[in-house]
């Protein structure tokens, strides 16, 4: 075969022999083209390429005309080495580059961290939902009975009023007298919570209730102490009585008996109270009754003396809240009840997640309410913000809004200045 290269192996020569003339010409032309320097490429006459013979160098005609070469082979080889393109690498076009860029972004550490955080947030929300539904399942729900008066003028969309009812009886169906009536007013606009204690001996009218049996309503014989309203008509009549006499909206209530309150206080590990020696001695009477009910031995949890910042358990805190015959009778008793409730709220802010779980479970297991599950669900989500609100305390009647008197049945009562009480409620809760 002509023009055989003695340095090529027989297998390579056989491979060349199998190629046709056009293929060999193409490879020869490709080899020459890759050896061109930049200046040669720029001198190509694109318009004359169509008239060139196959395999002819595009600059050969110019070189023949001038009779001169543009540069030495050595210089040309040096230039080609500097500008050499590694043609063994695959070509990358726009689409492949974009795909690689997306792949880099997709696999970036930042995106992975964000994805993990998102999954953790979703997981935590799911766990929180399960916990809330578990708590709500422990509450005892009551349908709101018949209401006869719920058109009070003191109301606002930004204020939620919930009446907290506390009784000495173990079962709310027994309708014992309510020794604790605290209206919890949550003001979302002013970021404050007001606890208003209504005195149990306040002499009030029972609306739409014939107490004396004379066949007529709103007579003198239809008046009684406020804490008796629950005995005669349950939570509905108590809410009607407060709305009618004090002209303030009360549509929701939560009932907790005093003995369940022991479990609630114990759930937070007790609270700290400032107790005088006289109060410590006076607490023995209510605690004697409590110990009998709880099955405790005589003298359990009695305090030998008072002190500042005493850590008390649920049994002792309840004895303190029920103490009536030390100090200014029921006036000071309502103050003690508000103090215990305030201390409980403060202690709840310090609880761990496990402690909060115990507290919420204890409250839900003891509570009876006419609030719906949806209302409680929303309230639970608001709870972390509500706990940060300022807490105000109020007593109705105030110091200048009552006088001592005698009721229709001859009992000692508080005769109320109702217009003054209404003005105080409006000023302290709604302004």
Image (tube, rainbow, N blue to C red):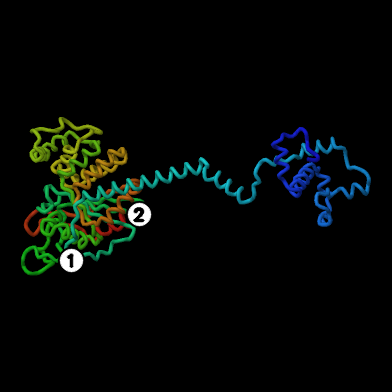
Q: Is residue 13 left or right of residue 410?
A: right
Please tell me which residue is depicted at 91% across the width and 47% down the height of the picture: 64
- Figure quadrant of the C terminus: bottom left
Q: Which one is nearer the viewer's eye here, 76 or 369? A: 76
- Position of residue 275 relative to residue 183, above or below, is above
Residue 203, picture quadrant: bottom left
Q: Which secondary structure lies at badge 1?
A: loop
**Disc 2 or 1, which lies upstream in sequence?**
1
Q: Which one is nearer the viewer's eye here, 85 or 382? A: 85
Q: Which secondary structure lies at badge 2?
A: loop
Residue 1, picture quadrant: top right
Number of labelled discs?
2
Q: Is residue 431 left or right of residue 406?
A: right
What residue is disc 2 on? 188
Report whether residue 399 is seen.
no
Report whether residue 374 is seen.
yes
- Residue 318 coordinates in the image, percent (x, y): 17, 41
Q: Which one is nearer the viewer's eye here, 306 or 195? A: 195
Q: Dot 1, how many residues are within 10 Å of its Cα: few (below 14), some (14-19), or many (20+)?
A: some
Q: Dot 2, how many residues are within 10 Å of its Cα: few (below 14), some (14-19), or many (20+)?
A: some
- Residue 308 coordinates in the image, percent (x, y): 24, 33
Please tell me which residue is depicted at 31% across the width and 41% down the height of the picture: 349
The dot on residue 411 is none
- Residue 162 coordinates in the image, percent (x, y): 25, 54
The dot on residue 148 is 1
Please tell me which residue is depicted at 37% across the width and 53% down the height of the picture: 190
């Amino acid at each position: 075969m002509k023009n055989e290269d003695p340095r090529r192996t027989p297998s390579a020569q056989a491979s060349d022999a199998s190629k046709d003339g056009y293929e060999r010409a193409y490879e020869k032309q490709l080899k020459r083209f890759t050896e061109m320097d930049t200046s040669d490429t720029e001198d190509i006459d694109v318009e004359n390429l169509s008239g060139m013979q196959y395999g002819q160098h595009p600059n050969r005609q110019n070189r023949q005309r001038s009779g001169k070469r543009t540069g030495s082979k050595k210089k040309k080889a040096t230039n080609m080495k500097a500008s050499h393109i590694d043609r063994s690498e695959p070509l990358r076009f726009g689409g492949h580059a974009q795909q690689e860029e997306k792949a880099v972004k997709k696999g970036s550490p930042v995106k992975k961290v964000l994805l993990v955080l998102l999954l953790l947030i979703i997981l935590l929300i799911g766990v929180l939902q399960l916990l809330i539904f578990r708590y709500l399942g422990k509450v005892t729900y009551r349908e709101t009975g018949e209401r006869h008066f719920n058109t009070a003028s003191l109301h606002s969309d930004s204020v939620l009023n919930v009446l907290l009812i506390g009784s000495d009886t173990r079962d709310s169906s027994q309708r014992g007298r309510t020794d604790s009536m605290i209206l919890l007013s949550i003001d979302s606009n002013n970021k404050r919570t007001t606890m208003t204690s209504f005195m149990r001996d306040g002499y009030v009218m029972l609306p739409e209730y014939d107490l004396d049996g004379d066949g007529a309503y709103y007579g003198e014989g239809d008046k009684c102490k406020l804490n008796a309203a629950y005995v005669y008509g349950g939570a509905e009549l108590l809410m009607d009585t407060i709305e009618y006499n004090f002209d303030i909206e009360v549509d929701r209530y939560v009932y907790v008996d005093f003995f369940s309150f022991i479990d609630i206080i114990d759930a937070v590990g007790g609270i700290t109270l400032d107790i005088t020696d006289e109060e410590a001695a006076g607490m023995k009477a209510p605690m004697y009754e409590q110990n009998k009910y709880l099955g405790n031995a005589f003298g359990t949890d009695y305090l030998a003396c008072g002190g500042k910042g005493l850590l008390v358990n649920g049994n002792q805190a309840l004895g303190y809240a029920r103490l009536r015959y030390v100090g200014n009778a029921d006036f000071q008793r309502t103050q003690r009840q508000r103090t215990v409730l305030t201390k409980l709220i403060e202690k709840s802010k310090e609880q761990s997640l496990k402690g909060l779980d115990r507290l919420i479970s204890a409250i839900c297991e003891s509570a009876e309410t006419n609030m719906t599950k949806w209302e409680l669900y929303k309230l639970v989500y608001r709870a972390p913000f509500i706990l940060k609100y300022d807490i105000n305390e109020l007593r109705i009647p105030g110091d200048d809004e009552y006088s001592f008197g005698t009721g229709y049945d001859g009992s000692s009562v508080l005769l109320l200045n109702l217009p003054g009480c209404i003005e105080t409620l409006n000023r302290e809760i709604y302004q």
